[in-house]
Image (tube, rainbow, N blue to C red):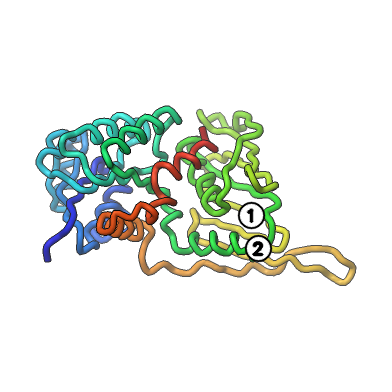
Amino acid sequence: MKKNYKALIIGCGKIAFGNSRADLNSHFGAFQKSNKIEIMGAVDIKKDKLKIIKKKFNIKIYDSVNLALEIAKPDIISLCTPDTTHFNLCYKIIHSKYSPKVIFLEKPCFSRYDELKKIRQHAEKNKIEIIVNHTRRFDKNFQSLKLKIKSGFFGKIKRAYFSYYNGWIHNASHQTDILNYLFDDLLIKKKSKKSFFSKKNNFDVILKFKKNLGLVFALSLSEEPYQIFDIDLHFDKYRLLIDNFGKNAYLQKKIQNSIGESFLSKKKSIFTINKVTPMQNAVNLIVKFLDSHDRILINDYNIESIGKSMKSIW
């Protein structure tokens, strides 16, 4: 079967290739599963890593972005390099003679707003779409939660708490983006202090929704003895707890006893097992966009939407 689109992967870390050829949570695995995408190769500056990738995944390798672009002439580029390289690499790719139609960019997108603004302007000028892989936006469970919140099923948000580790920009961007996405509202930093833990760039932060009244409390935790990724949402009718890196969600209903005291019911698991991974959903969306050129399809995932969300972090 003839493939419609060509893809190139830049950066050969875990999110790019996962644990195996069949890892559908990786860029390679999701591209390989698509019947419309041909993987043209992978790029990395570390030659020893490229040798491993070539042997394990049977894929063409490059240690030069320029050479890879010239030979592969990709329609889609997955950019999976370290955060601090995103701006320079995006700029180079956008201005290449062999620039793609879509850059599928790993999060966090950029380190500062001025970087995002410049890349957005140049991408628009060159008719290139940038889609950012904030994974939970592509997760059917979170998409369903968004609709339930919008419908008022849970009631009004009163307050929220989340924990993170490994840097405010690098890691808290996950949780702030989830909240911005779920509530269609922007979080604004009100107060911030350096975390009790000494790790650089970790902060305990109080944020506020721009339109909603609820406050959000962000707590930085050490990765010892284990990593914790939780979001605890307190509505006036329900409590919603999202844990285990967004894999589980538990709902508790507000109930009252005979003397009017309010408490919570037993936890009820509400997430279903995804038959298609969020990464597959992202790749399928990119293909659908390339087939149709309908920009409405990517409104929740493009650099414009993610840029608004990242203002909560910057």
The local secondary structure at tag 2 comes to: loop
> How many residues crowd mark 1 within 10 Å: few (<14), some (14–19), many (20+)?
many
Q: Residue at x 68, y 61 (%)?
A: 155
In the figure, 255 relative to 230: above or below?
Answer: below
Q: Residue at x 16, y 55 (%)?
A: 38
Q: Which residue is mark 1?
A: 233
- Taking depth in this image into account, of 8 and 210 the one nearest to the observer is 210
Residue 254 locus on image (x, y percent)? 74, 65
Query: Which quadrant of the view contains residue 29?
Result: bottom left
Which residue corresponds to the image point at 24% horizontal and 62% vertical from the top-left? 33
Which of the numbered marks, if any, corresponds to residue 15? none
Residue at left offset 62%, top offset 53%: 232
Q: Position of residue 311 (x, y in %)?
A: 51, 36
Q: Amino acid at mark 1?
A: Leu
Q: Residues within 10 Å of mark 2 (few under 14, many from 20)?
A: many
In the drawing, does residue 257 fall left or right of residue 56? Answer: right
**Above/below status of 267 relative to 210:** below
**Which amino acid does the dot numbered 2 rest on?**
Phe
Front tag of 1 and 2: 2
User: Residue 252: which quarter of the image?
Assistant: bottom right
* Quadrant hosting residue 290: bottom left
Quadrant placement of the N terminus: bottom left
Q: Nearer the viewer, residue 234 or 146?
A: 146
Q: Badge 2 is on which residue?
A: 154
Q: Could you tell which of marks 1 and 2 lies nearer the N-terminus?
A: 2
* Residue 143 horizontal side relative to residue 120, left or right: right
> Mark 1 touching mark 2, by CB under 8 A?
yes
Q: Residue furthest bottom?
A: 258
Query: Residue 260 placed where, x, y %?
Result: 87, 66
Give the residue at the far right of this rendering: 259
- Spatial separation of the CA atoms under disc 1 and disc 2: 10 Å
Asked if 284 appears above or below 176 in the picture, the reply is below
